Amino acid sequence: MLEKAREYNINVSEVLRKALEEEVRKREEEKARELLDLASKEVAKINTDEVVEELRKWRKER
């Protein structure tokens, strides 16, 4: 394969670097999506009324 790449004047280092960069970018995005999904599920568990009540208490104490 390397010989064929040389025949076509393909810069193997550059092609590999770009392919690796793209794969790393894809995996980082995938991981970020997974973390956002997890965070979204955790935030959904929070009772908004309780948060509002705690904020009101906190403001009164100030």
Image (tube, grey):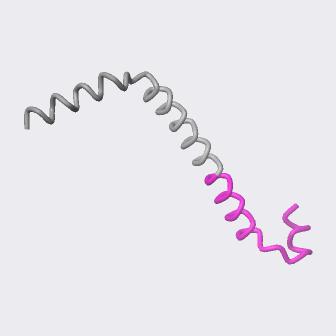
Residue 29: % across, % down: 60, 48
- Residue 44: in magenta span: no
Q: Judge from the rendering whether residue 6 lies leftward or rightward of residue 60; answer left or right.
A: right
Q: Quadrant of residue 37?
A: top right
> Residue sitting at 69 percent across and 64 percent down?
18
Residue 2: % across, % down: 84, 64
Q: Locate the C terminus by quadrant.
A: top left
| Placement of 14 over or under 36, stated as above or below | below
From the viewer's side, name the closer residue of 57 and 15.
57
Q: Locate the N terminus by quadrant.
A: bottom right
> Residue sitting at 56 percent across and 41 percent down?
31
Q: Judge from the rendering whether residue 34 lies leftward or rightward of residue 1; answer left or right.
A: left
- Residue 19: in magenta span: yes
> Residue sitting at 71 percent across and 69 percent down?
13
| Placement of 29 over or under 16, stated as above or below | above
From the viewer's side, name the closer residue of 5 and 15.
15
| Placement of 30 over or under 23, stated as above or below | above
> Residue sitting at 51 percent across and 37 percent down?
35
Tag count: 0
Report the magenta stretch's main SS: helix
Residue 26: % across, % down: 65, 50
Q: Residue furthest bottom?
A: 9
Q: Residue furthest left?
A: 62
Q: Judge from the rendering whether residue 40 lies leftward or rightward of residue 12; answer left or right.
A: left
From the viewer's side, name the closer residue of 53 and 37.
53
Query: Which residues are drawn in magenta?
Result: 1-25
Q: Quadrant of residue 19?
A: bottom right
From the viewer's side, name the closer residue of 53 and 34.
53
Q: Judge from the rendering whether residue 11 lies leftward or rightward of residue 53; answer left or right.
A: right
